[in-house]
Amino acid sequence: MGAVFAPVESRARVEAVVRRIGDAIELGLLADGEQLPGESRLAGQLGVSTVTLREALTVLRQQGLVTTRRGRGGGSFVAVPEPPGVERLLSRLRGWSSQELRDLGDHWAALSGAAARLAAGRTEPADLADLRRSVEELAGAAEAAARGRVHGRFHVELAAAARSARLAREQVALQTEVGALLCLVLGDDEYREEVAERQRAVVRAVRDGTAESARSLAERCVEESAARLVALRLTL
């Protein structure tokens, strides 16, 4: 949450707040029905005025990502959208060239590899609970949409384990581009379990403090997923 609610950049602040909170909702970092902090507190966390925050919340309500309740117990609450259908996802995938997907995969692997390497040197074993929870949620997720969401969340949490807010924000932004598309390759149960086992290996390497092993394992996990997306794109 520190990365989600860290101060936004000075330019285009309404748009930046909308993107930051909207991305976190779509990735499942904020749960459906979860109450956002009060306006004054949230504006302070994001480093914006309450006027800017209210404008951003208005946009988020128009996008169906936030609802507002008045009166006692009221406030702004998260509304997780329905996942896009397969045909819509395939249409989105067609919008990417295979080279663009490879470039995206390279960026993703670099981010996750760096995060894993740093986490191995900075994270205490007791701090790995969120990563372990995401791995087991992925292993038990029945629907492809849930698998894609949790897969993306794992990589955001890996960046958070590196104690780098900038890496976490970069990973959030990247997952909003690629996360939904992963539903297209995570529908296969055998591959879902393979991904979960790869993620378990990353967590073990981070726990053991083996930085280069953690980096290599995280990169391989990403590269395999990216390669599957490229292969699917080439069939369309």
Image: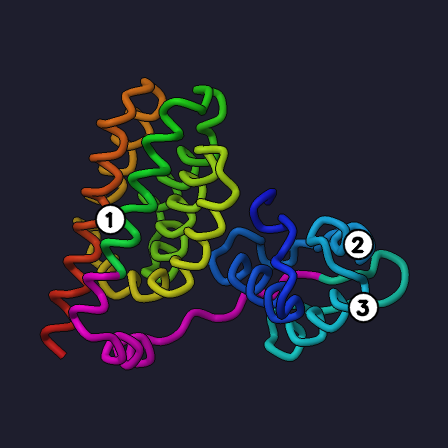
Q: Earlier in the sequence, mark 3 or mark 1?
A: 3
For this view, does 57 lie left or right of residue 86?
right
Q: Quadrant of the N terminus?
A: top right
- Residue at left offset 15%, top offset 65%: 230
List x then y, in percent, for residue 200: 29, 33
Judge depth for marks 3 and 1 and give the one in front.
3
Image quarter for residue 162? top left
| Image vertical order of residue 87 relative to residue 128, above or below | below
* Residue extent of the magenta highlight: 77-103
User: 100 or 64: which is nearer to us?
Assistant: 100
Residue holding disc 3: 51
- Residue at left offset 23%, top offset 54%: 106
State the residue lying farthest toward the front. 11
Which secondary structure, mark 1?
helix
For this view, does 150 lie left or right of residue 223?
right
Image quarter for residue 100? bottom left
Which secondary structure, mark 2?
loop
Residue holding disc 1: 222
User: 45 or 128: which is nearer to us?
Assistant: 45
List x then y, in percent, for residue 224: 17, 50
Q: Residues within 10 Å of mark 2 (few under 14, many from 20)?
A: few
Specify whether residue 213 is in view.
yes
Residue holding disc 2: 38
Specify whether residue 197 is in view.
no
State the residue lying farthest toward the right. 72
- Residue at left offset 22%, top offset 35%: 217
